[in-house]
Structures are given as C-alpha cells and as structure tokens.
C-alpha cells in the first residue's frame, strides 16, 4: 500500500455542474401524487443550489481553497458505476435524463423512486461520483494526504437499484468500491450524519472488505438497528449506533467514537477511511452535532489511518449559512487547523 503524502496535501473537489442540478418546470407537490414523489418534491426545495454556492463562497473567501490542491471532478464511467449500481438502474437514469422535460416530469411523478431530475442532474450526479472516486484514488496512491468532496446531488440514500431522498448515485459507495479495484484490502466508511445511510449500508451489507459504521437518530429501517450487523459474509462489518432523537449531541457522538468506532477501526485496520458528512444536525439544534463537535469527531477518526481520509458531503443543513459553516469547518480540520502541527 502506498505511503501517505509526506507533504500533507489536502485535495478539494467540487464542480460548477452541481449548480445545474435543479428541479424541472412543473415539479410541484399535489395530494394526488404518491407520498414518495411529494417527499422528493419537498426535499428538492431544501436541496437548493444556494447551499452549495454558500459553501464554495465561504471556503474560497476564508482562503481555505487556496491552501488545497484542486481536483477535477471527471464524470464517472459506466464500469465504475456498475461496481455499485445495477445496469437496469443506470440505464433508467440515463434514459430519463434524455427524455423531454414535460414527459420526464410525468414519469417522475409516477415513479417509486424518491428523487428529482432536471436537465443538468445526470451530469452533476456523474461528476459528483467521479470526483469522489478520483479523490479516493489520489489519496490512496499517496499523492494527497486527504481530501474533501463537496458533492451535489448527495448519495448515501442511493441504493444499488433505486434512489431515495434525492440521491442519484451513491458517491461514497462508488469511492469505496473503486478503492478496492485500486488494491485497497479494507475500507472503512463512517457516517456522521443524523440520518441513517440506508443506501450505503445496503451496498455493503454482505461485503467483509468494507466496514460501514453509522451513528444516527432512530430510523424505521430494520437495517438501522443496533442489532443489525450485516448479512452472509458481511456479518460483523456493519455497525449501527441508533440514538434517541434527543441524544444526538456532541458528548454522545464523541463517546460513541471513543468507545466503539476507534476500537473497531483498530481491529479492522482499514487502508482508507471515508467519512460521510451530512449536515442535517444543524436542522435539529440543540439535539445535533455542533460544528465544534463535528470537528472533534473528525480529528479522532483521522488517527485510525494516519490521516489518510476522504470526507464526502451528504445532504442536510437546510439553511445555507449553516451548511457553509459546517463545510468550511470540516475542511479546516483536514488542513490541520487547530492542530499543534497546523499547516
């Protein structure tokens, strides 16, 4: 396995195509529509491009971007997508993207999938996934110490053959699967979002080479329970910390990491750490991770792989200033801000 970058470079990946991921005309809620469609419509109003814009503005305005190595977000290819998603699902998304807007809206409103797709969505989704896969490769090869991917659309709720919560492709799962293709024997994914990453857990539930750990608020999904640890060969490689909604605080998250996640990491010995960073905690103040708590959690996790880590943003954080503050804070940790040997 290559050694981490001796220069401690931090990669930064985001692409302007994410701003073209917008709901199509005629995309509105109706009591006559299936609940999943109305849920997607509601989410599309919160997953607004202004959140992404505000994060980029803060990262650039604070001088953080200038301290990073900018990484291109090249579109993911089909071979890489097939490591996680079914060909039927990939073809469905591809065909839908090529469908005229009016007909596309009609199809989406009859679909069981929970998502929205504007004219620029497929390009944004492919570049988000490609950006994560590329960043993972750069860090694993030792050319970078760590990386931060500001993605849109998010991915942790995308399943192998369906979408949910406005996720199209599972960015972090694609990153992990491609790392295995590059020679990584063990990859650890830690999800710090308040929301359970049902898609990510499903992608690797039978895979002993990818450990998925999630600390989250209680969910209705049977896969989210503390008793669920995976299936088949993957039993023991899924770890859920399911919390009471009023217990998703800094102290509880930090305690869970120290008492459970770090010992698991020491036993698993991952070649790479991937962190799903959903900023939905800011929507549940005071019952959610603060930005300082988030940063402390990440600092603890970085020790498992000598800092070799890629952080991937997910959804959440409906207010643009909150989203931007969390994103800038996390990037600062990767750059070493607040550490004794800060770069």
Image (tube, rainbow, N blue to C red):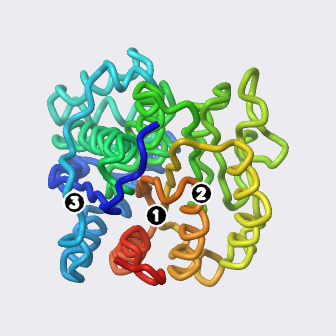
Q: Which residue is mark 3?
A: 69
Residue located beneath label 2 in the image:
195
The residue depicted at 41 percent of the width and 74 percent of the height is: 336
Q: Disc 3 or 1, which lies upstream in sequence?
A: 3
Q: CA distance from mark 3 to mark 2?
A: 30 Å
Give the class, few, some or many, for how many residues have Cα within 10 Å of label 1's Cα (few <14, many ≥20).
many
| In the image: residue 242, left or right of residue 74 | right
Residue at point 24%, 21% (across, down): 95
The reply to whether residue 33 is in sight is: no
- Residue that badge 1 annotates: 316
Q: Percent position (x, y) of residue 34?
A: 49, 39
Depth order, front residue of 178/123: 178
Graded by Cα atoms within 10 Å as few (under 14), some (14 to 19) or many (20 or more), the crowding at tag 2 reads many
Q: Report the front residue among 299 and 22.
A: 299
Give residue 92's quadrant in the image. top left
Q: Position of residue 314 (x, y in %)?
A: 44, 55
Pick the front one: 143 or 58: 143
Determine whether 57 is above or below 21 in the image.
below
Seen in the picture, residue 293 relative to 263 is either above or below; the reply is below
- Residue drawn at x 57%, y 47% is 189
| Cα separation between marks 3 and 1 | 26 Å
Task: Give the crowd class for mark 3: few <14, some 14-19, many >=20 residues within 10 Å.
Answer: some
**Which numbered disc flags the more N-terminal residue, 2 or 1?**
2
Question: Could you tell which of marks 3 and 2 lies nearer the N-terminus?
Answer: 3
Q: Are marks 2 and 1 in contact (CB under 8 Å)?
A: yes
């Amino acid at each position: 396995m290559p050694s981490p970058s001796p220069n401690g470079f931090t990669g930064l990946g985001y692409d302007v195509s994410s701003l073209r991921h917008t709901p199509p005309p005629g995309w509105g809620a109706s009591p006559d529509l299936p609940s999943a469609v109305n849920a997607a419509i509601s989410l599309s109003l919160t997953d607004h491009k202004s959140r992404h814009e505000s994060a980029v503005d803060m990262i650039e305005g604070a001088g953080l971007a200038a301290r990073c190595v900018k990484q291109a977000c090249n579109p993911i290819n089909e071979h890489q997508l097939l490591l996680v998603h079914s060909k039927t699902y990939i073809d469905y998304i591809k065909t839908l993207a090529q469908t005229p807007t009016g007909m596309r809206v009609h199809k989406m409103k009859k679909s069981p999938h929970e998502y929205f797709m504007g004219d620029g969505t497929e390009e944004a989704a492919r570049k988000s996934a490609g950006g994560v896969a590329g960043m993972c490769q750069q860090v694993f090869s030792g050319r970078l110490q760590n990386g931060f991917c500001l993605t849109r659309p998010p991915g942790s709720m995308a399943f192998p053959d369906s979408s949910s919560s406005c996720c199209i492709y599972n960015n972090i799962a694609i990153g992990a699967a491609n790392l295995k293709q590059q020679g990584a024997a063990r990859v650890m994914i830690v999800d710090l979002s308040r929301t359970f990453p049902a898609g990510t857990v499903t992608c690797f539930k039978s895979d002993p080479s990818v450990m998925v750990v999630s600390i989250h608020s209680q969910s209705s999904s049977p896969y989210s329970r503390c008793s669920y640890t995976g299936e088949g060969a993957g039993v023991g490689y899924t770890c859920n910390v399911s919390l009471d909604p009023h217990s998703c605080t800094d102290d509880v998250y930090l305690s869970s990491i120290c008492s459970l996640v770090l010992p698991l990491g020491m036993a698993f010995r991952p070649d790479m750490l991937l962190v799903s960073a959903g900023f939905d905690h800011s929507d549940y103040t005071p019952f959610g991770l603060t930005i300082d708590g988030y940063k402390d959690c990440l600092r603890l996790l970085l020790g498992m792989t000598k800092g070799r880590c890629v952080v991937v943003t997910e959804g959440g954080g409906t207010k643009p200033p909150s989203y931007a503050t969390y994103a800038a804070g996390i990037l600062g940790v990767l750059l070493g801000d607040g550490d004794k040997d800060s770069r």
